[in-house]
Amino acid sequence: MSDVPTINIGLCGFGTVGQGVWKHLTANRAELEARVGVKLNLARVAVRDARKRRTVKIPRRCLTEDPLAIATDPSIQIVCELMGGTTLARRVTLAALRQGKIVVSANKALICEHGPEIIAAAQKHGGHFFFEASVAGGIPIIKVLREGLVANRFPRIYGILNGTCNYILTQMDEQEAPYAGVLAEAKRLGYAEADESLDVDGWDTAHKACVLAWLAHGAWVRTDQMIVEGISRISPADFKNAATLGFGIKLLAIITRDFAKNELCVRVHPTLLPGANVIAKVNGVFNAISVTGDVVGTTLYSGRGAGQDATASAVISDIADAAALLKHGKGAHLIGEATTMVPRTCRLAPPESIRCRYYLRLTVKDQPGVLARVASVMAKHRVSIASVLQGPADRPDAASLVLTTHESNERAMQGTLRQLKNLASMLEEPLLLRIGDFD
Ligand code: NAP
Ligand code: HSE
């Protein structure tokens, strides 16, 4: 088979994801090469510290500490950026694209912050940018939006997009495990970002929501244009309260488009999901995404959202697409390419367009009249109370008040929250969670 072309691949980054790509591509090489019709040669690998001991052993001659050397190496056709961060990763990505190479990326932060520049560089220099691993780990959600559901417009996409947070929330709920210990375990398992605040404060989910919103709506929404709230204030008591009320708690990205008003809303926050919603039962490192298309209706996708193997699966799928593109020429794969996206315009929805029920947990002085004062603040903002649970708080002379509301809007709830914080009887920062009534 001497006429089978060889494609040289460079890996920039050989941590959790990079080593997974090497391991699985090597293990499944024969089958993969037979499927794609090319030889796949893992030629070079860049790391920060070439002397570091690694689980996956590779020839020393492949290693460099200069990822830009791989990006500009004329013999490398596919550059996989698997380092993370947005500074060197941006330089490496742009350098490779400017040479007309194909870049495969798992870096959602980079796409969110520099997506337009990267896509423009690919278009200008004839390069290509593939990023299946950037959202939802092993779930091929990028292909779903670009290819499988290309006939659709998308009024709603929502789901769990961060494996670390879902793992932490599940362990807290099922084992009542302390937050810090579960986070350390998520790091050990290779789920968390190098900077774990990206996960737990909601930013990683926001980066992924940005990528999905762009694919679905052609609009780049910055994270400072979204509501972004993380999971660090959720306590074991919230899981108990939510269960009493018939809900689970998940960190969700929610992307909604009102086509009549041409308004787009992208938000990330912990959400109470009714127990009957399938996504409420998706646990551990798994992600799940509900995509509603105007033609297809609602579709649902689930799978491992983080970790070495799931992410390697997505990166290798992009490598296979890239190899096929190199072998068969540009035309064959146009539908799978970011460079075909035409920017569209839509307005960002105002806060009052967010209408939902809310969950409010207050730690208050255990004194007469406190509940009445809380109710009066809510009434002033025209927020209607649906239920009240009262129980002991974990400090003396205090009570925990858990209220749910009838449907209200974000502006009214934020006004309520501001005023509640100032009550003399309020002992801790109130916790406000939104309830996700998705049908
Ligand atoms: P990681 O384990 O921290 O690995 C990062 C790799 O990049 C390491 O090999 C590191 O070298 C190398 N690197 C960092 N800075 C470098 C520099 N200045 N020069 C050369 N090499 C450098 O990270 P990861 O978990 O594999 O994640 C990589 C990317 O994939 C990130 O964008 C992440 O968001 C994304 N991602 C991760 C997952 C996941 O589950 N882990 C899932 C989807 C997407 P050393 O090894 O020498 O330190
Ligand atoms: N830290 C990310 C997560 C990795 O936990 O989902 C996958 O993108």
Image (cartoon, rainbow, N blue to C red):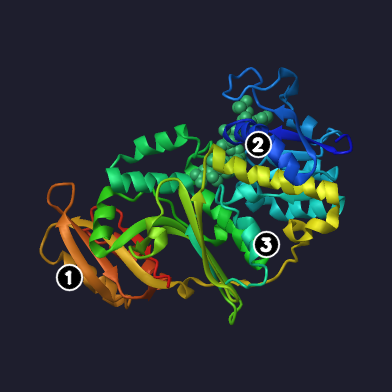
Dot 3: few (<14), some (14–19), or many (≥20) neighbours within 10 Å? some
Kind of residue sitting beneath label 1: Ala
User: SS for tag 1?
Assistant: helix
Residue 167 sits above or below residue 433 on the image = above
Residue 384 sits above or below residue 80 on the image = below
Q: CA distance from mark 1 to mark 3?
A: 52 Å
**Toward the viewer: 251 or 130?**
130
Which numbered tag is attached to residue 229?
none
In what quadrant of the picture does the C terminus appear? bottom left
Question: Position of 146 compared to 180: left or right?
Answer: right
Q: Is residue 42 visible?
A: yes
Q: CA distance from mark 2 to mark 3?
A: 26 Å
Quadrant of the rendered image containing residue 154: bottom right
Residue corresponding to mark 1? 372
- Which residue lies most toward the front here? 1
Report x, y in % for residue 359. 31, 64
Kind of residue sitting beneath label 2: Asn
Residue corresponding to mark 2? 28
Q: What residue is shown at x 56% (from left), y 47% (from top)? A: 137
Residue 142 sits above or below residue 107 on the image = below
Residue corresponding to mark 3? 146
**Earlier along the polypeptide chain: callout 1 or callout 2?**
2
